[in-house]
Image (spheres, helix red, strand yellow):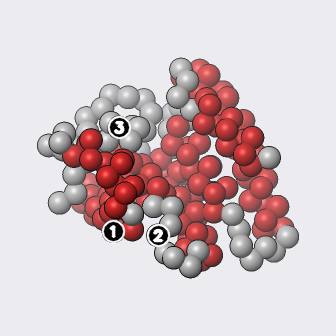
Amino acid sequence: IYFVSRDHRVKYEHEPSEVRRNVIRTAIPVFESLIYSDLKQNRKNLFHTNFAQLAYIYMNILPPDPTRAIEYLNKAIEVRDGIVQEKGTFPVYEYCRAICNIYRFEHKEIAGRPTDEELKELIDKDLKTVKERDANFITFRMDPVEENNKNLPNSHSKHIPSTQSVQYKSH
């Protein structure tokens, strides 16, 4: 069930707006049910990837919900760090959380959004964590962006920017 739903989400997350709006939302109840099933069975080890999949959905639906995505990324990180011996495995969660915070930095109209300074600190912390934990990940995902890091992104996209369009540079 997990893999079919994940593949469904991935297949449609970059489709035009109406398709994305309607199709990737259909995976939400599946991942919520998988989480509920784990909790109901009192499993000691929840699957952090179920929380992460919900976060990715909320990053890519239209309109995006970066605050909800961050809530699920925080839970995915908490669960991951509670079960994985080597802390920092899957640094993509911190990377995605930084992307969500960059989006919130750009969109001041988001309710309950932290201040610009708080967001900069959160973004810096996550990007530093990613870099410390997995140099290969940071090289693959961020190096092409580094040469364009003069300012925060000023994208007019209606969704959270992909990893290729993020142009934030930590200080």
Q: Where is residue 82 in the image (x, y as percent from the top left)?
A: 59, 77
Mark 3 nearby-residue class (10 Å; few <14, some 14–19, many ≥20): few
| Label ID, residue 88 | 2
Instruction: Please name the residue shown 22% across and 57% down the image.
Output: 170
N-terminal of the pair, mark 2 or mark 3, is 2
State the SS at label 3.
loop
Q: In 3D space, how far apart are the residues under numbered discs 2 and 3 (Cα atoms)?
A: 22 Å
| Label ID, residue 21 | none
Q: Quadrant of the C terminus?
A: bottom left
Q: Nearer the viewer, residue 17 or 109?
A: 17
Describe residue 41's horizontal placement relative to residue 76 as left or right. right
Instruction: Please name the residue shown 53% across and 58% down the image.
Output: 73
Q: In 3D space, how far apart are the residues under numbered discs 2 and 1 (Cα atoms)?
A: 9 Å
Q: Position of residue 157 (x, y in %)?
A: 38, 28
Describe residue 105's horizontal placement relative to residue 9 as left or right. left
Looking at numbered disc 3 in the image, what kind of residue is underneath it?
A: Gln
Q: Residue furthest left?
A: 150
Mark 2 nearby-residue class (10 Å; few <14, some 14–19, many ≥20): some
Looking at numbered disc 1 in the image, what kind of residue is underneath it?
A: Glu
Which residue lies under the disc numbered 1?
A: 132
Q: Residue furthest right?
A: 41
| Label ID, residue 164 | 3
Q: Do the residues labelled 2 and 1 touch (CB within 8 Å)?
A: yes
Q: Is residue 68 above or below residue 39?
A: above
N-terminal of the pair, mark 1 or mark 3, is 1
Instruction: Please name the residue shown 49% across and 58% down the image.
Output: 93
Mark 1 nearby-residue class (10 Å; few <14, some 14–19, many ≥20): few
Q: Can residue 115 be spotted in the picture? A: no
